[in-house]
Image: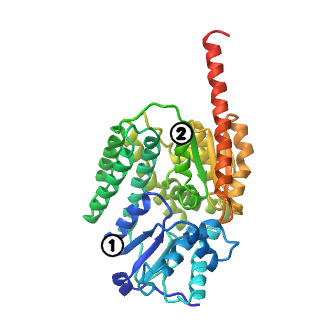
Amino acid sequence: MAAVDFTKQMKREYTILSPDIFPTHMELLQSVFAIYGYKTEVLHYEGQQVIDRGLKYLHNDMCYPAICALGQQIYALTCGDYDPHKCALIQFQTGGGCRASNYIMLLRKALHNMGMDYVPVISLSFSGLEKYSGFKLTPLMMTALRAIIYGDMLLLLKNQTLPRETNQGDTRAVVDKWVSELTEQFRHKKGLSGRSMKRNLRRMAEDFHNIPKTDKKLTRVGIVGEIYVKYSSFGNNGLEEFLLSQDCEYMVPGVLGFLQYCFANTEIDHGYYGGSMLGVLGGRLAGYVADKWEEDMLEALADYPEFATPVSFDKVRELAARIIDPGVKMGEGWLLPGETAELIEKGYTNVICAQPFGCLPNHIVGKGTIRRLRELYPEANIFPVDYDAGASKVNQENRIKLMLAIAREQEQEQEQEAQYEAVGC
């Protein structure tokens, strides 16, 4: 089962199909790829038919994100919307110990069983796990990943504005406006310098600030967990829409934090296991650049105190170190409890930990750290929720409703205590 190389000729003729992993970010990254001559399409297929197609060609014991993400690609090749002879598939790989690093071979095995060995599979990995003559992560393309910052900014502002908008649709309109504007900027190779990015980020914050909002009381909920089910509405059964229907304001940590976590782990690996300093220096350089981008975003938000802003990544590392050793870095590793602590300290004391059922790394750093988190934050209301091809959406939502019922009962008790103190009782 030899791998098919993605060639320079294919770059001109093929469509690269990507699973829909991150909201908004994927639309922007699709535009970035176009700058460098790659025709990329993000797949938005959802529903039981996609799950069934994934289960048909993948082992049913594989993790749920694999069934969803690879299922979207397999479905695209078999539903008639694309010519399989003119398509390539792309998967993101971190190179860590998670099963996600094996998605490439899993996908190739599925294609072999489908009689589609001719479809190239591309690994998008900063660690250079695979190389192709027609697909290269050039330094310029790496710079273009500023799109991640734009996506994080839109995600942060959308999640805080949408539940409070006075006129339904205003928030979505601003998000669409910025996706369209950034796409146009990217097409003309604009919006990717430090100066233009700062200007865009400030304008974004101003646009969301100007959306008319109510001051209604909402239950604040944080979302952490495995990277796919944390962000993907397909993977988490529309979690954000459900929380919105339950009068909640929710916050999801940005994607940049996961990249910073990967960069930081190069130095942690060296400290624990030794080896070449080259990887450490590369991680430090990438981390320095990411930290500068993070500063630009926080600076743009400084004039709008109504928005809850992320803390620095260094602070997340500091919080995580109180909970678990930094050597624990399979899956989301120490980042997950670090983000949980950040959300709690920011006032999002009700935290949903979204996890694929049977994902051992995330059950260790998710469920396994809840006791320590509750020792540090007695007010925390942390609920793990499992997602799986056989899991019931009703059961998941009922579990979240239980969490919200506890949260609202605690809020009432706190209000009563405040009233008693006010009257001197």
* Residue at x-position 48% and y-position 56%: 287
The answer to which of 46 and 103 lies nearer the viewer is: 46
Residue corresponding to mark 1: 36
Q: Residues within 10 Å of mark 2 (few under 14, many from 20)?
A: some
Q: Position of residue 316 (x, y in %)?
A: 57, 46
Which quarter of the figure is the N terminus placed in?
A: bottom right
* Residue at x-position 62% and y-position 19%: 418
* Residue at x-position 49% and y-position 85%: 119
Location of residue 182 (image quadrant): bottom left
User: Mark 2 and mark 1: span between their CA atoms?
Assistant: 43 Å
> Disc 1 marks which amino acid?
Tyr
Which quarter of the figure is the C terminus placed in?
A: top right
> Disc 2 marks which amino acid?
Asp
Question: On residue 247, which mark appears?
Answer: 2
Position of residue 422 relative to residue 301, above or below, is: above
Location of residue 80 (image quadrant): bottom left
Question: On residue 108, which mark appears?
Answer: none
Q: Residues within 10 Å of mark 1 (few under 14, many from 20)?
A: some
Q: Position of residue 396 (x, y in %)?
A: 66, 53
On screen, residue 368 versus residue 87, left or right, reads: right
Q: Residue furthest top?
A: 424
Disc 1 on helix, strand or loop? loop
The answer to which of 256 and 344 lies nearer the viewer is: 344
